[in-house]
Image (tube, rainbow, N blue to C red):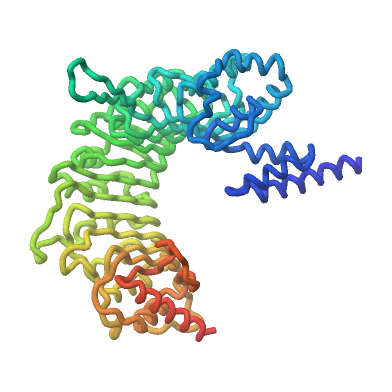
Amino acid sequence: MASATSAALDRDVLLHVIDFFDKPGNLRILATCARVCKAWCEPASRCLWRYLPSLHPLWYLLSNRNYAENPRMAAFWEFVDTDDFVKDVIQRHPDQWAHFLEVASFVCGADFASVSTELNLIRTVVKYNEGVTFLPSLHTLFWRHSVPDDTTCLLLCSPSLRSLHVGISRIRLTTTAIGALSNRITQFSPSLEPILSGLPAAAPNLERLTVSDHAVQNTVTFAPHIESLGSLHELVLRTRSFALSPALMRGILEHIPQLAALTTHIADFAEPGSQAVAPALRRLDLLESRSPDLVNFLESGFLRAPVLVSLRIRSTDDEYHAASAQVIPALAQASFAPRLHLLDLSISGDELVSRSPEQNPTFGRLVAPLRTMRELLGVKIALGLHVVSIDDSDLRALAQAWPCVQELELGWLPLGPRAAPPLVALRHFAALCPDLRSLTLTRMMLSRMEGSGVEEKKEKEKAHPLTWLNVKSFTGDDDPEAIARFLDNLFPNLELADPEPVKDPAPNNNIINFQHESSRITVEQRIRRLREARR
């Protein structure tokens, strides 16, 4: 009994050690652990083979060859008959075949680019594995689909698969007509329908489906297959040709009531029709869609989502449309708006609306309807269609409207003389947003700090929690000493860049981005001195 307990404890310690090294960049260490002894081999191999950027390592294991990182499969695979090869391994090297299947069972995630040679190999291995997948533990699969009518992807699916990402590639065919002076290039996309039609049976427990890239598909034909995925919790359609109409969105939400996250383009919402009910939908991402469709989607009350808390909207028009000005008011009137906690809104277009500086709308007036959404914790607003004016009063009004906000990013076009509020306006966020931790603004004016209305904090007063401040550009004269005192007094928890010089500093290391790098460094040096003096 004691020896059994000791063995169990030893294995627990071993698993803890292996888990410690199970991090990106530690493949060599894990490979060394797998060769220590039999007791170490299995747990280390599980970590080593858990995720594969391609299936090449498995093919080299099957052929008992040394794996070499190569964008293409070696010439060996281009000319070998896969059926004869696999049959030969099974008959002459059964231990090698058994080892291949054991290691393949460790794979939980894989990326795969569909190449005809590899597709044949997958089909052959599944054939000699009694028709079942050789990746029984596969949890996540990224499949690059480029071969027309191919369904090999389904052979890798099993009840263990939870997440499938299908990236569709366009195929380029070059043909030369008789007497033509140049080749003709034809592009087309392989149909996704054969995969989707068999997916409900092949992966009955699939929870997340993503379709992306530059595909041209018939949305009407693929939608019924998605509706059959009864366990789906997240659906991501990242391609314009998959834009959902009211009928298609209604059908998906009706057949998959447990859907919690939906990412898609929308289209044809001129007459939305009857309401779509999404009882479990918590996150909705509306990718680049026309402003008239978005306005009709929001104003009509088409979507009833009682638990929706996160909304992302991308409004974009090829030509200026008057409906773009109605997106924000329509959003504020939506039935789910008061309950939102996260809002990410971007309004842009190919045509820029600009007037004289006196006639440009203010940022505060454009987003004023959103000030009624008092429960927002994260806000990201980017107005890229209008040249706007923004000043101290605009920032004060937004700070008053969203007292619970923790992350705030405001973006506008930095054009014109009135597109930079004064730096002292930051005091409104310090006074009115006590939980704010991240703040990003497009541009600010470096004005004199005297009379800023900011009093020195008392020792026992709670310090503001803001740690990340990113002002993308500044205008005006620099006064590093005054700026340092101002920022340190407002936000004493700001994270500063590494004082040691870095060869290629990451842009996110800066608390603020001055027009001159020397100014930023000087301000941060002064802040450090102030902090050292308080210790």
Q: Residue at x 32, y 34 (%)?
A: 239
Front position in the image: 373 or 326: 326
Against 186, residue 365 (above or below) is: below
Q: Residue at x 14, y 48 (%)?
A: 351
Which image quadrant: the C terminus? Answer: bottom right
Against 525, residue 255 (above or below) is: above
Q: Residue at x 15, y 60 (%)?
A: 361
Residue 104 makes an appearance in the image = yes
Which image quadrant: the N terminus? Answer: top right
Give residue 526's position: percent from left, percent from top: 42, 81
**Quadrant housing residue 481:** bottom left
Front position in the image: 430 or 48: 48
Against 290, residue 23 (above or below) is: below
Give residue 324's position: percent from left, percent from top: 18, 47
Give residue 242's position: percent from left, percent from top: 31, 30
**Quadrant housing residue 422:** bottom left
**Quadrant housing residue 218:** top left
Residue 200 makes an appearance in the image = no
Q: Is residue 6 left or right of residue 27?
A: right
Give residue 208's position: percent from left, percent from top: 47, 34
Against 383, residue 315 (above or below) is: above
Q: Residue at x 50, y 72 (%)?
A: 500
Tally of numbered tags: 0
